[in-house]
Image (cartoon, grey):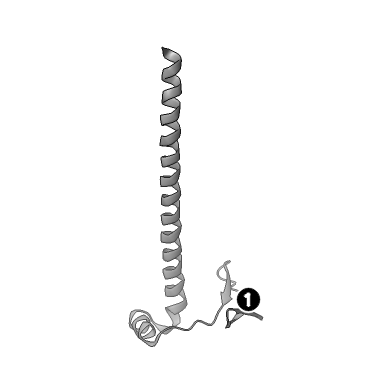
Amino acid sequence: MILLTYKMCYIIVHLKTHWENTMETIRINVSLPKEVFVELSKETKSRKRSQFITEAIKRLLKEKRDQRLAAEYQEAATEIRAINKELEGAVNDGLD
């Protein structure tokens, strides 16, 4: 068992390996607002909550990663257009 402290939050982490699934899992203690828990309970069976939460987190992380990549691509495209514009002038200067 590992005890992590982060900004006055304590997270107890248990490492365990599922033999039927090669993915190593970490057990954490998470606090949810009551209304979120009620909605979660309506959507999933108690034995499937971890899987539901894992899938939700994976989806959110993918969305955030995709947004970050899109912003980086946009920034790179802006830089490339600026460089192309500068080079266009240099190429035209040599053709006269």
Who is closer to the viewer here, 37 or 94? 94
Which image quarter holds the N terminus?
bottom right
Q: Position of residue 9 (x, y in %)?
A: 56, 82
Disc 1 is placed on an element classified as strand
In this picture, is 23 found above or below 79? below
Q: For label 1, count other residues whose C-alpha is less than 10 Å away and answer few (under 14), some (14-19) or many (20+).
A: few
- Count of residue discs: 1
Q: Amino acid at mark 1?
A: Leu
What residue would you read off at disc 1?
Answer: 15
Q: Position of residue 48 (x, y in %)?
A: 43, 78
Q: Residue at x 42, y 13 (%)?
A: 95
Could you tell whether 62 is left or right of 9 in the image?
Answer: left
Who is closer to the viewer here, 84 or 6? 84
Q: Position of residue 21 (x, y in %)?
A: 55, 68
Q: Position of residue 79 (x, y in %)?
A: 45, 39
Who is closer to the viewer here, 91 or 25? 91
In this picture, is 30 found above or below 18? below
